[in-house]
Image: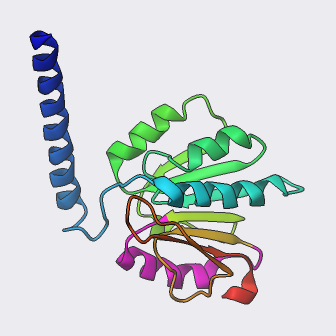
Amino acid sequence: MDIFLLLFGCVLTVLCIAFELYFIYAVIISKNCKYPPAFPSFGNMKKIALNEAEKFLSTADKPLKVIDLGCGTGGLLLPLAKKFPEHQFVGYDWDFFVCQILKWRARKLTNLAVVCDNFLKAKLQDYDLLLCFLDTKAANELSLKVSQEIKPDTMIISSAFELKDLTPSEVFDAKSYGMPLKVYVYKNSNNL
């Protein structure tokens, strides 16, 4: 039993060190936190975002294109790509490591592509559904880009951060683990 606890403690220590090293790496390459490190969708926020995306994708009468800006390791993209093989999915993230993790996790999916680059370089006019979970600065930059580029019938699901240049058609209370989170849904050009 003591050996098991010792091994468990060593593994936990290595994981904690690796996690801390990742955040140091992320701060350095993110131009002093211009872009936040990857943080997975979680709790009620993830459930609501997935539910809204699934409702939208399941009613489509043609194959749709979905983009996740700041996709991380694919917490939203993977379940959607698996459930809806008729649609095309693209994940954008600036972080090389999380992109490699997502590429490995999605290796058997032919309908999911991963782009390791700044998502503000993405051309948004071809997408039918846009997913994002950002920080305030990135959400403000994306808000302006979205209002200029998307098609009138594009649906946007933004977890935790409102896109200030747009008016949400629905706002969901997504309180998770004591945090007052929201999910913002933008459904059509009338909301721009």
What residue is drawn where x is 47% and y is 66%? 175
Highlighted range, magenta: 133-153
Up-down: is 127 above or below 6? below
Q: Residue 56, located in which quarter of the rendered image? A: bottom right
What residue is drawn where x is 46% and y is 75%? 161
- Image coordinates of residue 96 in percent, x first then y, are 34, 47
Q: Is residue 180 left or right of residue 109?
A: left
What residue is drawn where x is 45% and y is 70%? 181
Q: Is residue 46 left or right of residue 12?
A: right
- Image coordinates of residue 165 in percent, x first then y, are 54, 89
Q: How many marks?
A: 0
- Image coordinates of residue 3 in percent, x first then y, are 11, 11
The overriding secondary structure of the stretch rendered in magenta is helix
Depth check: 23 or 162 in front?
162
In reply to whether residue 169 is colored magenta, the answer given is no
- Which color scheme does this rendered protein use? rainbow
Residue 95 appears in view: yes
Up-down: is 180 above or below 40? below
Q: Quadrant of the C terminus?
A: bottom right
In reply to whether residue 134 is colored magenta, the answer given is yes
What residue is drawn where x is 36% and y is 78%? 137
Up-down: is 41 above or below 12? below
Q: Residue 141, located in which quarter of the rendered image? A: bottom left
- Image coordinates of residue 123 in percent, x first then y, are 58, 68
Q: Residue 97, located in which quarter of the rendered image? A: top left
Residue 127 appears in view: no
Depth check: 158 or 9 in front?
9
Q: Quadrant of the N terminus?
A: top left
